[in-house]
Image (spheres, rainbow, N blue to C red):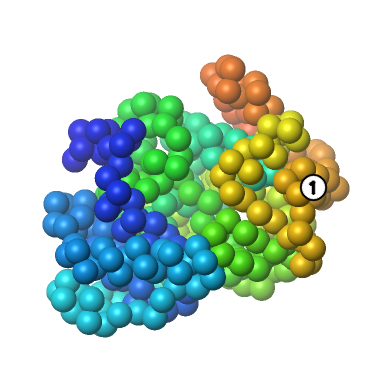
Amino acid sequence: MTDSLTAQLTAPHPDGTAIALYRTRAYRFTDDPRHYVFAEALEENYAQGTLPSAATLTYIRAVLDQIRATGQLLPFNEDIAAAEGVDIRGERDARVPYAPRLMPEHQPTTLVFIIGAPRSGTSHLFNLLAYTGRFAYFTTASCWAWPTRNLSHPARRSFETIGDRVLAVDNKNTRLIPGLLMPYEAEDLYHRAVPTYEHRGGHTYDLQDARLTDQSLLNASIQAHCRHFARTSFLTKSPFNSLRIAQLDAATGQRALFLNITRDQEGTADSMRRNHFRFHHHGTPLTEEEAWELFTTTIDRDAPAERTLAVSHHDLLNDSGTQIQRITRWLDVNGVSGTADAPTEPGRSLG
């Protein structure tokens, strides 16, 4: 399986990427769990060599087109699921033990939030730090509704186990390979726990004032991942967390650490344009340069100086080894610890 995943790094198959994208978009943009379990079953079958029918792939691509156009999914198609032999009710029942629940014994000792404007290098820094093996983190297969259920499935393999070649590949490829677990921003969770935008379709967002609406959901998912990885330090990233700093700091008892990756306005804005990111602010359209300014000024205003380390995108690209050493030294000084006790079997000791 490792050889197969490695071979896909530079050229993932379009059918596999459609299935993986359907799953992550379903988590994020609908509350209908039938989409979740159907997408998970399709992806797990695909990773083990069973391909969906042409009709199913047509349906998946239609769902993705609808999300790009409107930000909404098409209604769930029971007939398509039945034709694929997926028992939706049975699959949902099997996930009940994985529902998010608070587990105080798996409360992390340290939480590290990577922040920065969109397209400033947050994903690259996230991958590099997660690869050190020091942290628990949300993954491309994590789901807000059953946080770590997918992470132990035999059809999936962590990027930590397949060699550092994965770090040189654009995240647009690695996050869409069925079976490959990569660090991920988990906006399906964050948008439910600390909403700060309205999704208008594609990569277009109307940015709003952040508000903490479900701290328990956030804490339970973090604890579940600390338990799964058997690590007491938790690492997470999302550019949108740059607009949630005050809420996240309050939710974590003002003990979180922040890594602020900085990139020049011109380079960031150009990358936003090339990748079709569009932002509004309370309904007013922003230029890419204005979006960069909104994210960076919010970070400057809200990030606690004594618990924030600036990381240069330019320096990280040119000498990642030195920068990761610098960051880990800073984290060590600020109390980042090692591993926790080994996790128990998934699905047990959750009460």
Residue placed at 26% from the left, 63% from the top? Answer: 57
Residue sitting nearer the eye, 33 or 201: 201
- Under mark 1, the amino acid is Glu
Q: Residue 253 location in percent, x, y?
A: 72, 57
Q: Residues within 10 Å of mark 1 (few under 14, many from 20)?
A: some
Residue sitting nearer the eye, 287 or 152: 287
Image quarter (top left, top right, bottom left or bottom right) of the C terminus: bottom left
* Outermost residue to the right: 301
Image quarter (top left, top right, bottom left or bottom right) of the N terminus: top left
Q: Residue 232 location in percent, x, y?
A: 51, 46
Q: Residue 260 location in percent, x, y?
A: 70, 38
Q: Residue 13 location in percent, x, y?
A: 27, 45
Can residue 179 be seen from the camera position used here?
yes
| Mark 1: secondary structure | helix
Height in image: 67 above or below 14?
Answer: below
Residue, disc 1: 290
Q: Quadrant of residue 323?
A: top right
Q: How many marks?
A: 1
Residue sitting nearer the eye, 163 or 136: 163
Height in image: 314 above or below 224?
Answer: above
Can residue 220 be seen from the camera position used here?
no
Asked whether, in this view, residue 133 is left or right of residue 266, the answer is left
Asked whether, in this view, residue 85 is left or right of residue 290, the answer is left
Residue placed at 30% from the left, 42% from the top? Answer: 12
Residue sitting nearer the eye, 217 or 50: 50
Residue placed at 39% from the left, 41% from the top? Answer: 173
Asked whether, in this view, residue 320 is left or right of residue 140, the answer is right
Residue placed at 43% from the left, 64% from the top? Answer: 65
Height in image: 298 above or below 251?
Answer: above
Q: Quadrant of residue 107?
A: bottom right
